[in-house]
Image (cartoon, grey):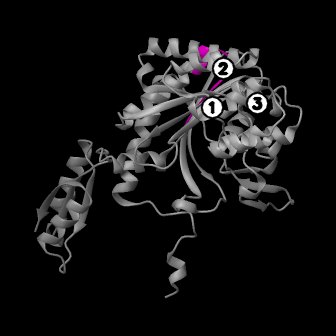
Amino acid sequence: MNKKRVHTPEGVRDVYGIEYRRRSKLKDKLKHVFAGYGYEGIRTPGFEFFDVFNSEKGTVSSREMYKFFDREGNTLVLRPDVTPSIARCVAKYFSEEKVGIRLCYAGNVFLNNSSYQLKLKETCQLGAELVNDDSVQADSEVIAMAVDCFLTAGLHDFRISIGEVEFFQGLTDAIADDEIKAQLREFILNKNYFGLMEYVENLDISDEVKQVFLRFNELNGDVEILDQAEKMVSNETSRQAIARLRRVYEILKLYGKEKYVGFDLGMLNKHNYYTGIIFKGYTYGTGDAVLKGGRYDNLIEQFGKKAPSVGFAIVLDELMTALQRQEIPMEAESVHTMIVYREELMKDAVAKANELRRQGRSVILERQNPNCSRDDYEQFAKEHYLGEVLYFV
């Protein structure tokens, strides 16, 4: 037998059995949260034209995409990010809509990155997007919904860390050299604060801006950190960003979610399409943020509709890893009963299975295997989390 045929390529994996059932149950619970906020489901294709995700849109680099060609020679890619696909759909199907559009989705994304730290190249994401609303109320709604997603999943020890792209933008507005801006952004994205400090010391920029960058790693914490940041800056863009974060916090208090949030003014996102508030959800047991989101007011306009928007995506694989490592019980789509029957008693076994299924129960109807003992069936039921085993033997 060719062993290569039974293995998956690097960065992808099979999901089956109890894990599959737990994933399905968790997805249903998160979709219920979205529905509770009035978000309507949407499904976009697994692959699209390359131009939907190219660098001008601010999404991932070309080298991280899985690319191929159709019969006409068009370059297609497996989607590396769902948000640009949603933006395309909004421009196409809701071009004249002025009222808030609330959409949610679940789907796989594909990133051709290096598999360091056992990173998967195919992951499942669930997310929500609120379109046609540029308000702090919209920002607060999606963050409150993100908190509810974590709570519904079973997490209690977590934090939604909130930043603002405009805070960084205000600091760099006076810097004319785009290469310097890009290098500052790279240091901050990689959390390389020692490199940032060394780099900033040699820059010809104002002392005020230099001091902010030298203390960038300190600009995270509870809401009081906004007071500290406000004292450090004088440019209007950065100060307005701080003011917006304050307003979001006050609205989150109305939702009763303020204890789950903190602030990180040193936060940036690798996707360049974010224009305002950005946020990430962290918990124990995973090496990366479980949830990422923010405001992207210019992305949909690149597809033909001017529509300010905000949203987030949850990486289901990371969320399940966190739940498992924190030993938080995960519900599973249940199989209630397995009926093991001897062939002569098939009529009675089928009648019992039909009766239980009419009651809404799931039933496995298993013909008795002469090579299996009752202990084998009981062990199978235990391993697959079956409710009970009935014997017609």
Was residue 134 drawn as part of the magenta stretch in this picture?
Answer: yes
Q: Outermost residue toward the bottom?
A: 1
Q: Position of residue 96 (x, y in %)?
A: 77, 20
- Residue 307 visible in the current orientation: yes
**Residue span colored magenta:** 127-139
Up/down of 243 relative to 20, above or below? above
Up/down of 68 relative to 58, above or below? below
* Nearest to viewer (mark 3 / mark 2): 2
Q: Amino acid at mark 2?
A: Met
How many labels, in total?
3
First in residue order: circle 1 vs circle 2: 1
Which residue is denoted by mark 1 in the rendering? 215
Q: Residues within 10 Å of mark 1 (few under 14, many from 20)?
A: some
Residue visible at 69% across and 14% down?
240
Mark 1: secondary structure: loop
Which residue is denoted by mark 3 in the rendering? 300
Up/down of 340 relative to 265, above or below? below
First in residue order: circle 3 vs circle 2: 2
Mark 2: secondary structure: helix
Q: Amino acid at mark 3?
A: Ile
Q: Position of residue 285 (x, y in %)?
A: 40, 48
